[in-house]
Amino acid sequence: MKILVVMGSPRKGNTYRAVERIREVMESLGPVEFEYLWLDTANLLPCRGCFACIAKGEEKCPIKDDAPAIERMMHEADGVILASPVYGMNVSGQFKVFVDRFSYIFHRPRFFGKKALLLATTGALGTREVLSYLSLVAQVWGFEVTARAGLVTPPGPAPDYRKEENERILARAAESFYRAVRGGRRRRPGLKDVVIFHAQRGSFGELEDEAPVDYRYWKEMGWLEPGARYYVDVPVNPFYSAIGRIVEGRARRQIRKDRVS
């Protein structure tokens, strides 16, 4: 079992120690290999907002850095831990550069065989906001989020109750993540997942001329076929599908309206 840690902290502080505790718990359950991607030292340059990766394909990006190699690292891992401290009520700057650099994956998701664990640490506030953001990124990129851990790690010595609570959170997340990666099967998607799929399907299905790369990708993946209900072949709640189709119809009508005007 190979786990890739995308580390958004620039130092070996609370976030790193939390990941190491997750590693210890997982190693107690079975063989596991951890690999760290330290974003503060990675050769990953900020996005220029030129739109080339969206309009022409990610291979047309004018930035020459390690982004392709980093994407391969995510593909080669069985599971990915997305870890960031709370900076200014959001992910760290290093982590935001990482997300922005792979913006094309929001249009062309691809990590459907991968599980994700989300980790956020803070001195006081912000774990809910950061975990919500990480969840959105991971889910739209195709990951199945199987565990979340938000830790409060105040400056100075932590009280015993806080240490015990953080330990419970980490142990529970590590065990859930391990079982999910080992099990391999993907759970049924939630309502939000299904709505996102249909919203994208409605949009990209209408944009063959305006967004040909996205359209071709969705076409090749089979997601534009009449019977497609989700990105992967898993059972989908019929009620969720009905809501998704309503969202898809609205997305198509809005694009057609904008095109006319």
Image (cartoon, rainbow, N blue to C red):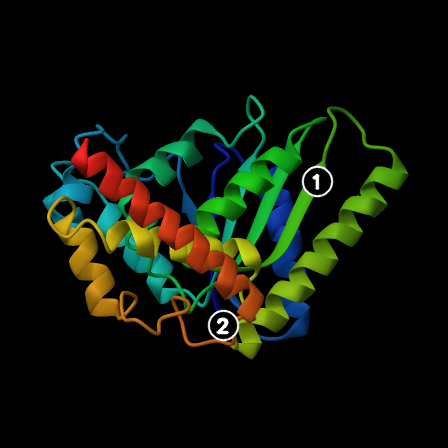
In the rendered image, residue 209, in percent from the top left (x then y), is placed at 10, 48
- Asked if residue 5 shows in the view, the reply is no
Give the amino acid type for the residue marked by disc 1 in the picture.
Leu
In the rendered image, residue 13, in percent from the top left (x then y), is placed at 60, 35
Left or right, 169 with respect to 99, comes to: right
Residue positioned 35% across, 74% down in the render: 227
Say few, some or many: other residues with alpha carbon within 10 Å of mark 1 (under 14 / 14 to 19 / 20 or more).
Answer: many
Q: Which residue is mark 1?
A: 151
Look at the image and tell me in which quarter the C terminus lies.
Answer: top left
Relative to 243, is 165 above or below? above
Label 2 secondary element: loop
In the rendered image, residue 61, in percent from the top left (x then y), is placed at 14, 41
Circles 2 and 1, Cβ within 8 Å, touching? The answer is no
Disc number placed over residue 118 in the picture, else none: none
Disc number placed over residue 1 in the picture, else none: 2
Residue positioned 58% across, 70% down in the render: 180
Left or right, 57 with respect to 75, comes to: left
Left or right, 236 with respect to 76, comes to: right
Residue positioned 38% across, 47% down in the render: 250
Left or right, 125 with respect to 177, comes to: right
